[in-house]
Amino acid sequence: MVDHVRQKITNPIIISALACAVLFYTGSARIRPWRPVRTLIPLENVTGLTGRIVSNPVRGYSGSYYRTQIQLESVTGDYGGPGNAVSSAGGVVTVSIDSAVVESLYPGKLYSSSGARALIESGERVRCAGRFNPVTGTFIAYATEHIGPGDGLAGRVMRLRALARLQFKRLMFAWGEAGALVLALLAGSREYTPGKVGDLFRDAGLSHVLALSGMHLSFFSRAAGMTGTRIFGRKHSQTVQLIGILTFVWFAGLSPSLFRALLCTLLMMLGARLFVSGPDFLSVLAASFLIHSCIFPHHIKTAAFMLSYGALAGILIISPLVTGITSFLFPPGTASSLSASFGAFLSTAPISLSLFGIMTPVSIISSVLVTPLISLFLALSLVSIILCLLMPFLLPMFGAILDALYRAIIFAAGIFARAPRITF
């Protein structure tokens, strides 16, 4: 087994990815900015900007603001003379927008009854007034005006996505806290997830469950593949599977971990077409790392990027080394899950300690026992959504079923959250 692992890590693609990782994380290689801001007005003088939203709004820890990224079209500001200057602009900037604006259309939110209405979703155009924070480089918007959708076919498609996400939030709101978990798992939106639930999952070593990742994409991939096989036959099942994967990613948005999962899936599909025996998954992960770093270099230093690649690398490299031990103590399925969980924990522990100063060994066990409940919850959620859209009168019944399973998940997570953590 050791020789098999050694043979894998001598692969040129894997060596290239490892070398790039060393250069990136030791500071030896400079990571270029992603779509750097280009404007004639110095950023410290900018008082307003207009552009198109290119990411899902994410609620800040305090809940008073949301952060999103905006592709700039123009900026206004003080150029040293009388009045304000206007300049065309390019690049992407992070903007903090008041919660009252972002949540003005959200169901059940305090601001939903206000007069102002703004659809703050990816693809929509906005105009913001405010100032750049010189420390964080974030534009703090004091006032935000929604202009409308983007231009052309792409703008109409993104408007459809924005409205679909808004309607989905309204449907999930009817299911209370269970619906909030569904919303986090399927749309990457946590504005309805109680803070105590996020803390509970973190303390239990289950934060990856709430982050859109390979687990969620694999679930959709299997579901779409099975559906395609039953309806269209095995010949066209992969096409249906690909459509299902791309639709989910389009709807949920490209987080670093989800994009990693998408790249790996696409490379695996391509490899299965080109090679009889299929590609080696560690090589696929390494190739995904290199491609991802080129497309979204600003992801490289994010926690989601490092933890996602680190966890999967640990599963592929470390897990085979301990499977022989766990297989003597547990049934095959449990032994495999424990080995994978141990590999993921061991490879991500240094990252967690470096970034957060905390390590949760209980995640080795909690992931094995709670993840199947999450998968069941996801499957039941999808069935419930489809049936409730066809027959709305079933909404209360499925809401009660999902709530019962949600309580079981929270109960299980609560048990593991009591385990001691290692902090530095």
Image (spheres, helix red, strand yellow):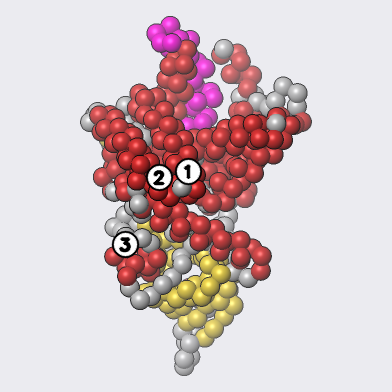
Q: How many marks?
A: 3
Q: Earlier in the sequence, mark 3 or mark 2?
A: 3
Q: CA distance from mark 3 to mark 2?
A: 25 Å
Mark carried by residue 109: 3
Q: Earlier in the sequence, mark 1 or mark 3?
A: 3
Q: Earlier in the sequence, mark 2 or mark 1?
A: 1
Q: CA distance from mark 2 to mark 1?
A: 7 Å
Using the rendered image of the protein, determine whether residue 204 is visible from the camera's viewpoint: no
Q: Secondary structure at mark 3?
A: loop
Name the residue carrying label 2.
Answer: 394
Q: Position of residue 195 (x, y in %)?
A: 28, 48
Graded by Cα atoms within 10 Å as few (under 14), some (14 to 19) or many (20 or more), the crowding at tag 1 reads: some
Q: Secondary structure at mark 2?
A: helix
Type of amino acid at the residue the image marks with label 2: Leu
Quadrant of the snapshot with the N terminus: top right
Q: Position of residue 117 (x, y in %)?
A: 41, 72
Q: Position of residue 251 (x, y in %)?
A: 54, 51
The magenta segment: 306-331
| In contact (CB < 8 Å): disc 2 and disc 1 | yes
Residue at the image point whose x is 40% and y is 45% from the top: 394
Name the residue carrying label 1.
Answer: 387
Residue 209's place in the image compared with 188, above or below, is: above
Question: Magenta residues: mostly which secondary structure?
Answer: helix
